[in-house]
Amino acid sequence: MAITQNSVVTFHYTLSGEQGETLESTRERDPMLYLHGAGNIIPGLEKAMDGRAAGDTFSVTVPPEEAYGPRVPGKVQRVAAKHFPQPRKLRPGQRVQLNTRRGPMQAVVLKVGRFNIDIDANHPLAGRTLTFDVEIVDVRDATAEEIAHRHAHGPGGAHH
């Protein structure tokens, strides 16, 4: 069965950066599941999956524009320490969640000062060209519930 709109795809991947360094892999854990066509994975990877089938293996290199987007300098900000529950416990490189007018925002702490915290709200992989080595494990038709929920449900319930 070929991957088309509303297919549920189960796959393993190894993600590498520009220098070939491994950034992430599912090889030592359960494979990923996603609903094809629902925008649940980055656009460049989803495009590369289209028309493939269980058993296929391939590599695809995805530019930032089809992955996590370019780095946006405006997402590096200085925030008053009073906006953090325990600012003295923060360390550079730590991930934090801020509540903003637009909802929760994930960020990485860059610098901790006495009165301000410098953060970067860009996705950690923004601005990077990424290579995925993919093995498609299974392809099936989505259930009506999965289509309505716009994501795949794996063993034991929803996969997010």
Image: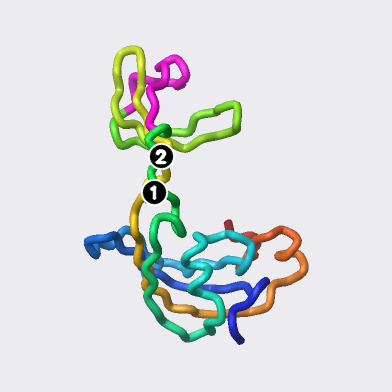
Q: Residue at x 31, y 31 (%)?
A: 110
Residue that label 1 marks: 126
- On residue 72, which mark appears? 2
Residue stretch rendered in magenta on the structure: 76-90
Q: Residue at x 31, y 13 (%)?
A: 114
Residue furthest out toward the left: 19
With respect to residue 26, does 53 lie above or below? Answer: below
> Visible in this render: residue 155?
no
Q: In terms of depth relative to the viewer, which is nearer, 95 or 45?
A: 45
Where residue 149 appears, as percent x and y from the top left, is 72, 58
Decide if residue 86 is on the left or right side of residue 104.
left
With respect to residue 26, does 71 lie above or below? Answer: above
With respect to residue 48, does 150 lie above or below? Answer: above
With respect to residue 105, does 4 lie above or below? Answer: below
Decide if residue 66 is on the left or right side of residue 115.
right
Q: Residue at x 40, y 70 (%)?
A: 13
Decide if residue 2 is on the left or right side of residue 115.
right
* Sooner in the amino-acid sequence: mark 2 or mark 1: 2
Contact between labelled residues 1 and 2, with CB atoms less than 8 Å apart: yes
Where residue 143 appears, as percent x and y from the top left, is 73, 71
Q: Residues within 10 Å of mark 2 (few under 14, many from 20)?
A: few
Judge whether residue 5 is colored magenta: no
The quadrant in which residue 155 appears is bottom right
Judge whether residue 85 is colored magenta: yes
Q: In terms of depth relative to the viewer, which is nearer, 105 or 122?
A: 122
Where residue 120 appears, as percent x and y from the top left, is 38, 34
